[in-house]
Image (cartoon, rainbow, N blue to C red):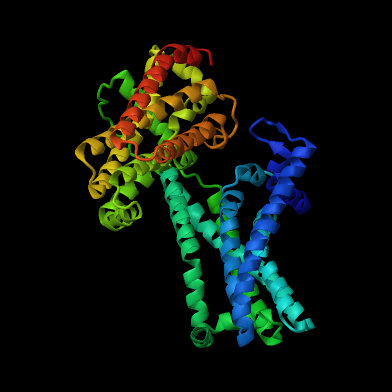
Amino acid sequence: MLKILIHKQVGEIFRSYFYDAKKNKARSKISSILLIGSFVLLMVVVLGGIFSVFSLLIAKALIPLEFDWMYFIVVSLIAIALGTFGSVFSTYSGLYLAKDNDLLLSLPISVDTIIISRLVTVYLMGLMYSAVVIIPAIIVYWVLIDNITLPIVVGNLMIVLIISVVVLLLSCLLGYVVAKLSQKLHNKSFITVLLSLLFISGYYYIYFRAKVLIGYFLENVLLYGKKIKTFAYPLYLFGRASLGDWKALLITMIITAALTYMVWKMLSKSFLMIATSSANNAKTQVKSFKEKPKSVFFALVQKEFRRFTCSADYMLNCGLSTLIMLIGGFVLLFKGKDIFANLIYLFDGDSNTICIFLCGAICFLIATNDMAACSTSLEGKTIWQLRSLPINTFSILKAKLAFQLILTVPVVIFVTLCSLWFIQPSQTIALAVLLFNILFTLLFGLFCMYLGLKMANLQWTNEISVVKQSGAVVIALFSCWIYGVLFVGIYLGLGNFSALIYLSIGIILSLLLSIIFYIWLKNKGVKCFEEL
C-alpha cells in the first residue's frame, strides 16, 4: 500500500507536465517533452549556473584562507533556505490539508503509511531545490582544491543527504504553523497577498544588496570565523562534517536523527487533528441587522469588489499597481526631493521633459491594474446568474469598468500630485499632466473591457489561466507599456516641441478613443456579453 501511495504522490508532482488543466485533457508527447525540458533547463542550467558562479566567488575567497568549512556553511545555509521555501507550501497543502485526506482516512490504511507517503513528496521537493545549490557548490569545490580524498567525497555526499533531511524537518514545522494559521484566518487571500509582497520585497532587497553584503562578509571573514567557533559551535561541526571529519560527521548525523524522531512524533500526534478539522467549525453568533437599500449599480460594483478580495491570485496579478502607486506616492513625499533633484540635473533643469517621462511612467504603472480585462471571463459557468436577473446589461458592464477605475484613478491622482509637487512645472503643464493621466486611465479601462468581451473565456478550469495567462490580459499589459514608450519616444524625437501642445494632443486623443470605446461598449459590447 505504501508503494501505491508513493506512486500516487509522485504522479501528482509531475501531473501538470502530462495533463493540461486549462483544456481538461492530456498533453501531447511533444508538449510534455518541451515542458520537462524547459523545467530542466531552468533548474539545472539557469539556477545551477547562478549558484555555481556564486559558489565560485565565495570559494576563491575562503579556500586560500583555509576556511573550507565556512564555505560549506554558507552554501549549505542557502541550500536549506531555498529548499525550505520551495517545499513548505507543499507540506501545507500536500500533507496537512490535502483534498483527499478524508478519502484516504476512510480506507483501511494506517495513518503512519499516509504520513510517510506524503512526506516523500515533501522530501523530493526539498531535495530538488536544495540540490540546485549544494551540488554546484560541491563541484566547484572539487575543481578548486588540489586533491580530492575519500573523506572529502564521503563528507560532501553525506552533507547533501543531511541538508535534504533538515529541509524536510523545517518544511514540516513551518507547514504545521501555516496549516494552523490557515484554520484561524477568515480571509486568507489578504494574508497570502501580504506574504507574497513581503517575499518579493525581501527578494529584491537581497538581490540589489547582495554585492555589498557579500563584500562585507568577505572583508570580515576572519572575525566571523572566530565568532562561529565560539558562539555557534554546532555550525562549525556542520562545516567540518562537510569535509569528511568523522567525529563531526557522526555528531551531526546523531543530532539530525534525534531531530527527525522528534518531528515524527509531532507529526503523528498533529496530523489527524489538523487533517480532520474544519476551518469553519468555530461557533459564530448570528446577528440580525437591517440591510440598507442599494442601487443596482452599487450592488454590482460591490459584487466585483468581493470577487476581487476573495482571490489572492486575482489581487496579485490584476491589482498590484494600486499598492505600488500608493506606496510610491508616500515614498515621494519623503524622498521626492532627492529623486527629482537628480532627474532635474540629468535633464538640465527641463521640467517639461520630466513631466512627459512622468506620464510615460504612469502608463507603465497602471498596466497591471487590468481587472476589467478578465472580470467577464471570471464569471465562468455562473454567468447565467447575472443574465437571469432583471438587470440592464450595460449596468453590468459599467460596474466592471467602474471597479477598475475606482481602484486606479485615486492612486494615479495621488502619485501624480506628489510628483508634480517636486517637479514644480507651470500650472498649465501640471494641469495637462494630471488630466492626461486621468483620461489615459479611463481609456485603458475601456480598452480592457473591449478585450475582455472580445476574448472572453468561460470554460476555464483554473482561475490563474484567466487572471495571468489569458490573451486579453497579456495584450492589455503590453499595449499599455508600448503606449507609454511611444508617448515618451515620439516627444523626444520631435526635439524642442512644446510640451503643452504635445500633452494637449495626448489628452484629445485619449478622450476621442475613450468616447469610441464607450459607444462600442454601450452597443456592440452589450450584444457581445449577451451572446456569451
- Tell which of 350 and 168 is nearer to you: 350
Residue 332, position in %: x, y? 29, 52
| Side (left or right) of 453 relative to 414 | right
Residue 192, position in %: x, y? 46, 48
- Tell which of 365 and 238 is nearer to you: 365
Residue 345, position in %: x, y? 32, 56
Residue at 71% in and 85% down = 246
Residue at 43% in and 15% down = 520
Across the whole image, how many numbered discs are drawn on residues?
A: 0
Residue 281 lies, with reference to residue 210, above or below; the image says above
Residue 84 appears anywhere in the view:
yes
Residue 263 appears anywhere in the view:
no
Residue 274 lies, with reference to residue 152, above or below; the image says above
Query: As drawn, which residue projects farthest toward the front?
Result: 496
Residue at 63% in and 62% down = 50
Residue 335 lies, with reference to residue 31, above or below; the image says below
Residue 458 sits in quarter: top right
Residue 201 lies, with reference to residue 378, above or below; the image says below
Residue 102 sits in quarter: top right
Residue 508 sits in quarter: top left
Residue 377, position in %: x, y? 52, 26
